[in-house]
Image: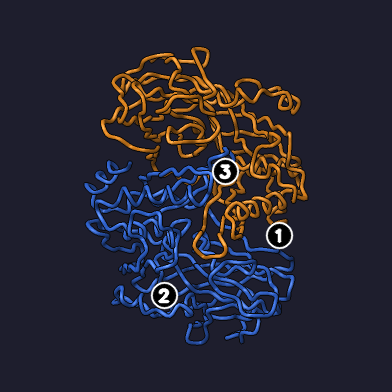
Chain colours: A orange, B blue
Amino acid sequence: MRIFSFTDGAHSYWSRNLRPIAKIEPEEIITVKTRDSSDGQINKDSNVKTLEKMDFTRVNPSTGPFYIENAEPGDTIAVNIMEIKNSGWGWTGIIPGFGLFAGDSSLQLELSGPALKIWISDEKYSRARFGDVEIEIKNDPFIGTIGVSPGVGGRFSIVPPRENGGNMDNKIIGEGSKLYLPVFVKGALLSLGDVHLSQGDGEVCGTAIEAPAEVKLSVSLIKRSIKMPYVEFRGRQSIYNEYVSFSGFSNNLIEATKIAVLRMINAFSDFMEPSEAYMLASVAMDLRISELVDMPNYHVSGVLPLDIIKNEEVREKIKKAIK
Amino acid sequence: MRIFSFTDGAHSYWSRNLRPIAKIEPEEIITVKTRDSSDGQINKDSNVKTLEKMDFTRVNPSTGPFYIENAEPGDTIAVNIMEIKNSGWGWTGIIPGFGLFAGDSSLQLELSGPALKIWISDEKYSRARFGDVEIEIKNDPFIGTIGVSPGVGGRFSIVPPRENGGNMDNKIIGEGSKLYLPVFVKGALLSLGDVHLSQGDGEVCGTAIEAPAEVKLSVSLIKRSIKMPYVEFRGRQSIYNEYVSFSGFSNNLIEATKIAVLRMINAFSDFMEPSEAYMLASVAMDLRISELVDMPNYHVSGVLPLDIIKNEEVREKIKKAIK
């Protein structure tokens, strides 16, 4: 099996002019080493000062691109994600100016960052201390950024997701899933990086458990055309047992989301800093649109597994702190 | 066990002046019979003409209110939902002027309704034919509308969810869950109705599998105060095995949602009417906010279990029709 690393080539923007680092055959199984979303600027020994000095032009470096043999514009590729191995650690941070509450001056809480949390990971779990609370999150790793070359010329920021995929941050793009991407240029030019060991739908503070990783995958070539990415995946057994769902109601979907997230942050605030609770929401709380037709109020649910809290006594106290 | 029916009393608006139909003790187990959201205007033999004649002032009738002994303003009640039994059938409809695509003149598809689908339900499944496709959905019943008296005078529409709960349409409020509601008036004045046998997060066409039902529950009284509803629930085993996730990207969360839903409707449109696919999305497709921080594009995922399609051949064809 061929192994490719970010040292072979990586890029932090999209362009059809990138030079492929390798040609791979359809169905060939390869391993791709990816850097974390800070491009190695943060490591296991970093503290919040590292965040303050970070060069943001380097975020989300993606290893590649790979030229897929025989892929032509109008085809589709399906990326079969076979395995994702972590490197023993990950990080979560609040980057000033980024995230759901960035620039929200109405807040009574300090959520603007910078803040940094380092997780220690084994094969199954990532662990960190948030204030008084021991947190243990089941790893459910996925590829945060994965995409192909855009069809048009120019350089495109790697931050927003687009028709070519990219920084989709979709927690479903994990082991056992199959990601379908449209092909816009000869060879498709597939790249990937920004692995997350765990994340809630929404990634509210702007980062998940960001980690360097090794991804084992193959690419299938399909002679039909799609316009946008989609994912096929298998049902998974529920990892956790005990959940709480925070409702947010508003005539604005983003405001409804903010209400749900703030309720979680408030419930946790007796036990940790608000910024820590915000990061925890980002890595563990799923945002579901419960309804968007009962006007004038939308309903967003923030669904959080309580099993991530190792201290049982604290778990019970947090349940009583929900207002 | 005492059994209460909508014939004992039901209401289609919120008011603190409603007269209780019964006083119940904390922890008393009761059964509450509820009408479907049309207030019995639709039955198992109805067709689309029934929808056209419907009186919408009667929607979401809720059985009650129940006066909870010793509940005082500033307390919290927890509703323990023990069992929800269906009545052998349910309905899904598109009501003109209602739903995610109501009034959207940019659409190329006919999604404005009226349209009506009747489901036949047994203990485990609800079944209906959508165009050429046999659909079988696992019942996962929950209470669509449940709430307490508001704290202020006046009559309030039962359609939008609010601090007092109401028409939350949150699929988590089902068997085994515990819904916490704030108490605003003496006795709390709890009412419930609008049971859904199954629904996707979002309820995009405006209706789920709407059904008359019997709900077994008890109410716990808690001497602390909350501001808004929340739900505690247990992890459930994944009901389905095979899923597909449709991405929608936009700088507007509602538009991102529309893109994800339209992609599903388009994929299904060779096999059924677009309006049928829209109803199917409403009852079976979950809307997850995959990320809302990678500006300028939000990412909404429409997650659909394919196991609901009984014809395996059609299932494979639909996968190939995704664009």
Q: Bin the neighbour count of mark 1 within 10 Å (Cα to Cα): few under 14, some 14-19, many 20 and up.
A: some
State the SS at label 1. loop
Left/right placement of residue B181 relative to residue B259 reads right
Which mark is on residue A323?
A: 1
Q: CA distance from mark 3 to mark 2?
A: 37 Å
Residue A59 vs B76, above or below: the answer is above
Which three-letter amino acid code belongs to the residue tagged 3? Leu
Instruction: Give the mark nearest the N terminus, 3 or 2.
Output: 2
Residue A116 pos. (x, y %): 71, 32
| Pointer 2 chain | B
The residue mark sitting in front, 3 or 2, is: 3
Residue at figure coordinates x 62%, y 28% from the top left: A90
Residue A173 pos. (x, y %): 45, 36
Q: CA distance from mark 2 to mark 1?
A: 32 Å
Which three-letter amino acid code belongs to the residue tagged 1? Lys
The quadrant of the picture occupied by the N terminus of chain A is top left
Please state the total of marks drawn on the protein image.
Answer: 3
Residues B21 and A107: in front is A107
| Pointer 3 chain | B
Quarter of the view holding residue B104: bottom left
Q: CA distance from mark 1 to mark 3?
A: 25 Å
Which three-letter amino acid code belongs to the residue tagged 2? Pro
Labels 2 and 1 touching (C-beta < 8 A): no
Q: Which residue is mark 3?
A: B292
